[in-house]
Image (spheres, rainbow, N blue to C red):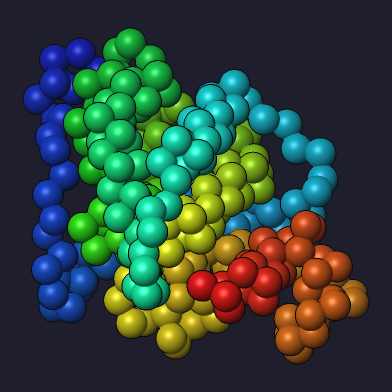
Amino acid sequence: MNGISGESAKEAICCPERHILSVFDLTKWCRSKAYMEYMAMVNELNDAVKGVMSTEDIPISPKVMDAIDILDDLQKWTLEYPPEDMGTQRFGNVAFRKWYDRLTEEADDIIYGLLTAEKKGFVVELLPYFLNSFGNATRIDYGSGHEASFLIFMFCLRKLGVFVPSDNRSLVLRLFLKYIRLIRCLQTTYRMEPAGSRGVHALDDFQFIPFLWGSSQLIGNKRLVPESYLKPDIVEMHSSRNLFFDAIQYINTVRLII
């Protein structure tokens, strides 16, 4: 994707297709160049926030700001599609499908707005990852696979030069944090069910990355220890400064009442 232009770009552009259909397909994926580059991005972003608090003053480039504004607009849509009466049903408010239908209708234009003229053809490749970043409209659920889709979307934008290395810190502590805020809004507004069952083996049913990048933020601190996240007062104190504690605070205050 990176460095492709002109006629060669048109030939190279193709709609992504799912190739990981079973656990046996993972071996090929884990040996691929795409996987290596994807993990390199995750680790690079992890390194960018080592010892950095979320509340620090971080410069934001126009393109990162554009992406943040997009997520902000998507969150405002929840006010236009309020939850419907669910009766005794615990999960899956069908109003989410109206929100998602609008996302599907406008996604092309949303992505177009992030790309330069010569890269707009790549919207075909970006679209599936973008749409899959916000959950499944049929099941009305969300899980770490959807979170991974958003990371792949970020990865593609980096490959296209929309985001650059100097954006790394703001990608984590501004754009990704805004994404998490949006996802939590969707989860609570539409009572989204956790996707799959793997979340029971982690701290959270829905997210994974906040714990990885949040732990990087904690490197070098001299006060917090692993058991600190079990203490609600400490969690609340540090939730605005750190992605890890922010995620725990969300579990403590919101997830338990869903």
Examine the rendered structure and indicate whether residue 121 appears above or below residue 166.
above
Residue 255 as seen in the image, left or right of residue 119: right
Determine the residue positioned at 14% across, 38% down.
15
Q: Is 209 left, or right, of 19 in this rendering? A: right
Q: Quadrant of residue 252?
A: bottom right
Of residues 244 and 192, the one nearer the viewer is 192
- Residue 175, by quadrant, is top right
- Relative to 253, is 20 on the left or the right? left
The image position of residue 157, as x and y in percent, is 40, 34
Q: Position of residue 10 (x, y in %)?
A: 14, 21
Residue 67, image x, y percentages: 51, 31
Instruction: Mark yes or no: residue 235 visible.
Output: yes
Q: Nearer the viewer, residue 40 or 205?
A: 205
Quadrant in which residue 9 is drawn? top left
Whole-percent x and y of residue 4? 26, 24
Relative to 69, is 181 above or below?
Answer: below
Above or below — where is 62 with respect to 183?
above
Can residue 152 be seen at all in this image of the molecule? Answer: no
Q: Looking at the image, is 142 positioned above or below residue 14?
A: below
